[in-house]
Image: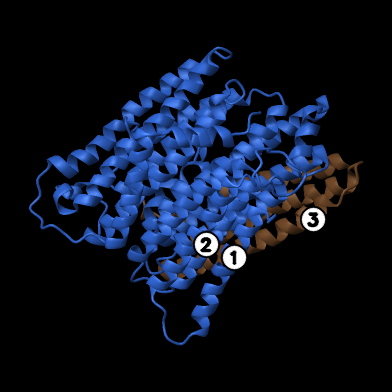
Chain colours: A blue, B brown
Amino acid sequence: MDFNTPILVTIILAVVGLLMPVIDALRRERISNKAYGIAASVTLAIVIGVIIFNILTNNTSNIILTNSVLSNDLFGAFFSIAMLLVSIISTISSIDYMRKTPNPAVYYSLMLLSSIGMVLIAYSTDLVMLIAAWELMSIPTYVLAAFKKRDPSSNEAAIKYFIFGALSSGLLIYGISLVYGISGSTNITVVIQSLAHIDESLSFIALLAIVTFAAGFGFKMALFPFHMWLPDTYEGSPTTVSSLLAAATKKAGFAAAIRVIVIGMSAFSVEWGLMFAVVAVLTMTIGNLAALTQKSLTRMLAYSSVAQAGYILIGLSVAPYSDLGISSAMFHVMNHAIMKSSAFIAAAAAIVSISTVNIDSFKGLGRRMPVTAIVLTISLLALAGVPPLNGFWSKLYLFTAAIDASSTVTWGSYLALAGVLNSALSLGYYGWVIRKMYFEPSTSEKVKEPRIILGVLIFTLIFMVGFGIYPTPLIEFSSLASPIP
Amino acid sequence: MNITEFVIISAILVGIGIYGLVVKRNFIKTLFSIEIIVNAANLNLIAFSKFNPITSSAGQITALFSIAIAAAEVAVGLALIILAYRLYNDVDVKEFRRLRG
């Protein structure tokens, strides 16, 4: 049967996502949080199944440029799977985490609608589609961040997120208007062709367009000058939502940046590689330094998420000079999605059981919540890039790409060096949490761990250790899916 | 009028919008600033659509899209303002000092 995956996925998610609040409004008796959570998770699982089935039956091309609005390509499938895995992890964990929160139907519906936006961003090859999908992803997450209505810090988190998110989409629309002015079209293929033969007098406008795009995507990717909102938002919003924001919407930023800037703008010969490299080093260093002094686990994870964006950006900045560039960045995107969501879900388990994420109160957590502590330890080690976990391999590939690029550009090897030094630095604060959990005694009793979250944590544990020992399938998938500019 | 004037006006509007976002502390003024940025982009799109030698209506369609998107965004923003007003009795961003690290 000939069908178009992105459209099918949109239809499935939209039907379920829109039906849930309607059913909730029509029925008199309350349906439990659990039922909605299971419905949403099953829908997401079906959607992931559809995408994987489509890859296996070779319905997906790896041609990245088309004249249509959505392209059913492997690149989109790769990012969709990474982001939908995070969505499903957050959704299942919410069954435990949001147990006492009112309006479960709206919560899960917004999760599904935001997932549609992510999938469409990954597949879109037209700038108008991209901005519509971008907003479809962002607007539900503003509401999700503010979902704890009576909690002032949730509201504050949402407002800070909203201001920066709205600014980012405003800048994106402005960038699109400039690109449209230069090329007379919003299709990325046409834009590339016209940027390749650009008139000398218009090159200033083209440069301005690249800068506005980089800034617009940079807000979501949490690159250095645009990262101020992120720690507040991740700390204040519900932790399952933070997991979605840190691990999924951020990846959508990278998907869009690869589509538009790396593929799109590579035709236009400006030294954006060096610009990205400088931003990458600053982002890593500032994220890691700020994370060192944090007292709250979610805030520390937020800063570490800033640092990880810097690592991924290494891959994008060396993309014009090394074939490994984009594929290694995509490999780290997939790994980081799982590692980071796993760490945030472990924090959510801590909130459910001991209702705090203050690192000082994690004393003796290794005995109080054994499974959560093990998974948190493994995901922190994976984030730091300790072998034989999955984070090690993707960092290795990123640094190899940077060294590979150093044959053309001199800064390549410095970039790899900065990455290695930053990994060592990050082990400092990850190690501190692990020390608190295992080597500091506590007199408190053992507490009950939330059961559904445990299931999710064990899944992520298997993913991290499994692909750490045998990373070949992921490496192959990311190199197949990566577009070579 | 020619195309350059439109582009300059829209660039000035974007500048005003970013200035408002950075300097103003009132959340409603922040929303105004965001609207100014989006409308600057719309002005650009429509001007390019009119003056481009390759006639295409894509610019006008994009502008319509962006108006609808901005409306949805502002609706969520206003909902957040109402929530903030109930919690703080104020809509000033400087009240938000709970999250610090």
**Looking at the rendering, in which quadrant would you find the N terminus of chain A?**
bottom right
Q: Residue A294: x percent and y percent?
A: 30, 42
Identity of the residue drawn at 45% across and 31% down: A311
Residue at mark 2 to residue at mark 3: CA–CA distance:
27 Å
The foreground one among A441 and A459 is A459
Horizontal side, residue A405 vs residue A263: left or right: left
Give amino acid for label 2.
Answer: Leu
Q: Which mark is residue A112?
A: 2
- Mark found first going from the N terminus, 1 or 2: 1
Q: Residues within 10 Å of mark 1 (few under 14, many from 20)?
A: some
- Do discs 1 and 2 belong to a common subunit? yes
- Marks 2 and 3 in Cβ contact (< 8 Å): no
- Marks 1 and 2 in Cβ contact (< 8 Å): yes
Q: Which mark is residue A14?
A: 1
The foreground one among A120 and A150 is A120
Residue at mark 1 to residue at mark 3: CA–CA distance:
24 Å
| Secondary element at image label 3 | helix
Q: Is residue A377 above or below residue A411?
A: below
- Do discs 2 and 3 belong to a common subunit? no
Give amino acid for label 1.
Answer: Ala
Residue at mark 1 to residue at mark 2: CA–CA distance:
7 Å
Q: Residue A36: x percent and y percent?
A: 44, 71
Residue identified by numbered label 3:
B61
The foreground one among A73 and A135 is A73
Q: Is residue A165 above or below residue A416?
A: below
